[in-house]
Image: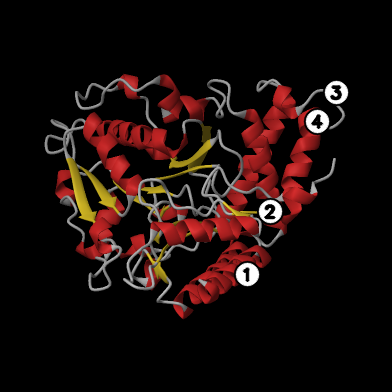
Amino acid sequence: MSTTPERERTVNLGAGPSKLSTDVVLEASKAFIDYQGLGIGVAELSHRSDTFKTILANAENDLRKLLDIPDNYAVLFMQGGGTEQFSSTLLNMLAAHAAKHGNNSNAGASAPPVDYVVSGAWSKKAVQEARRLTSRVNVASDMISMIGDPNAEIPSPDKWQLSPVDEYPAMLYYCENETIHGFEFPEHWIQRLPQAYRERVPIVADCSSNILSRPIDVRAHGVIFFGAQKNVGPSGVTMVIVRRDLIVDPDALQASYVPPIPATLVYKNMADNGSLYNTPPTFSIYVSGIGFRKLLLDGGVPAAQERARIKSELVYKTLDVFPHVYRPTVAHPAFRSKMNLTFRVLDRASGEPSPDAEKRLVAFCREHHVVSIQGHRSVGGIRASLYNSVTIEEANKLASLLKHFAEVN
């Protein structure tokens, strides 16, 4: 099989599902028809077969190498995307809390607090889901109004309004990179939490849109989750990295604040069955595994991080050259995403965002085969997603088009 001229000239900067490297697509397309000469395609393999179990094991092993995942963490291949993990992480952490503190008179009698940091649309949705499921949801920091304000100070974790550790919070959730708002926490930002809090409270990281683009300290977290469709592979599989001592049987607990958890959301069910409790998204797992292997060969996460730096700088520096035309939506350079670059196109007369000018930019880029740069429907503007599969050359093409547009419009 071969690629097409149309694919070769198109630069797909969609936010997700997003671009897959052509070599990954070609390898997967061959396996889709006939996997390793078996006469059946990889998507037709039984998930109980030894062949698929090898695919699954290889994907897990390569992911462990990429992220330096220690043995006391399980890797689960689940479904439902990051959105379903808003429910699953909370419910499983409530269960883990009950298993650990159920006999503690200070911690086990009523629902524990759960802490959330809101930095954009997805963390806001996580809070909304939490409020459906438990009674003591504490927003430790809400930064949405600060993102576009250059005079606002983004609070450091040691200044967040965290629940007291002696109230035994069940978890702290934060989103490493907000796909819609283009906000990304600086690397290892979570390490600034008070030490006593970090030692006692499981930290949950939503890494759906920046996983494998920079290192993350797995050991500093209780749970890390990410959907594949942004920076890993095709949509369908959601990967969950969870510390094993947090994996408990919720049905064995008596705590009233732990509701019945749907069976496919229970981490123990997935861990005990090697992610084969029910039929997993086999093809998505297979393609993600190809991507893991390719990334290892391409230098792993450190090399991906350096490419991400180069790509994002090409674009951000172009925006900075034309402040009368472009305005990044994140006013604080240290918090601007290297994966999802969001900005507005300004009206030259008023200096305010111009939806008409943004439509012209989208059309101009499309004419030059750069597609899917329109912002999310909820916020508008422009969003260029420079995931791992986007090359430096493609980022440079976008930067050149932005320069040309600014000069002639």
Q: Is residue 277 left or right of residue 136?
A: right
Which class describes the residues within 10 Å of circle 2: few (<14), some (14-19), or many (20+)?
some
**43 left or right, relative to 281:** right
User: Would you identify the image quadrant in which residue 133 lies?
Assistant: top left
Eye-nearest disc, 4 or 2 = 2
| Spatial CA span between label 2 and label 1 | 14 Å
Distance of label 4 from label 1 (alpha carbons): 37 Å
Q: Residue at x 43, y 72 (%)?
A: 325
- The reply to whether the C-beta atoms of the residues labelled 4 and 2 are less than 8 Å apart is no
Residue 186 in view here:
yes
Residue 113 drawn at (x, y percent): 18, 41
Lower position in the chain sequence, tag 1 or tag 3: 3
Q: On the image, numbered disc 3 is attached to which residue?
A: 39
Quadrant the N terminus occupies: top right
Lower sequence index among marks 3 and 2:
2
Residue under label 1: 396
Mark 4 or mark 1, which is nearer to you? 1
Residue 133: mark in rendering: none
Which is more foreground, mark 1 or mark 3?
1
Horizontal placement of 17 versus 195: left or right? right
Residue annotated with mark 2: 10
First reached walking from the N terminus: tag 2 or tag 1 = 2
Mark 1 belongs to which amino acid? Answer: Asn
Q: What residue do we see at 40% from left, 76% from top?
A: 324
* Amino acid residing under circle 2: Thr
Nearest the viewer among 80 and 331 is 331
Q: Say whether marks 2 and 1 touch (CB < 8 Å).
A: no
**SS type, badge 4:** loop
Q: Nearer the viewer, residue 12 or 82?
A: 12
